[in-house]
Amino acid sequence: MSIVKFYRGDPNAPKTTRKAHLGANAIITCKGRLLLEKRRDSDTWGLVGGGVKNYETEVQAIAREVYEELGLRVPKEKFRKLAVYGEPGRIAAYCDGSIWRMVIVVFGLELEKEPNMVISAESRELRFFSREELSDIEIVVTHSDIVEDWFLNQ
């Protein structure tokens, strides 16, 4: 069962009930393939990452999220900031009634070899994808443009 629905640029998206939510997500690659997680909350594929806590910077948040979601300890210096996606139509609507505008800071991380990863409680599956394989999966709409932009700039 989906506990969240995502919107991007949809005029029918619900109105926000909360302040803008700052998130950090990672484009993690290995040999030209992109790591995605199959999310439990929406049963769609998305980038690794999550919310930035009040006490941390965006890069601290992505290092924490990578550890929490993959079991990988990566020094924050290994991440490079790629972009910020903050247009007003990027919305997450949760089943508890909270509706947030999302501002996403995207970081890049290139791995030399595929690591041994641990699937967190937030994920169903972790997998590296080629560009061609992406056409066979559903990517969460608030990440699909980020993924497209990354492949276009490669």
Image: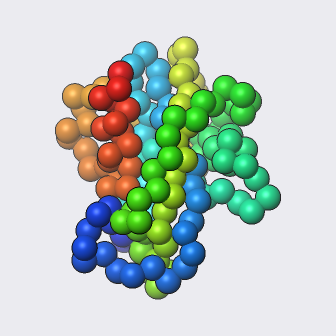
Relative image position of residue 28 (x, y in whole percent): 50, 31
Q: Quadrant of residue 9?
A: bottom left
> Going 66% across and 56% down the picture, which residue do you hit?
52
Residue 107 appears anywhere in the view = yes
Location of the C terminus by quadrant is: top left
Residue nearer the viewer, 18 or 45: 18
Relative image position of residue 63 (x, y in whole percent): 68, 40
Picture layout, residue 107 above or below residue 9: above
Residue nearer the viewer, 131 or 124: 131
Q: Quadrant of residue 21?
A: bottom right
Farthest residue, direction right: 55
Farthest residue, direction front: 87
Residue nearer the viewer, 123 or 81: 81
Residue 125 appears anywhere in the view = no
Picture layout, residue 55 above or below residue 136: below
Relative image position of residue 86 (x, y in whole percent): 46, 56
> Going 35% across and 80% down the picture, which residue do you hit?
14
Relative image position of residue 24 (x, y in whole percent): 58, 49
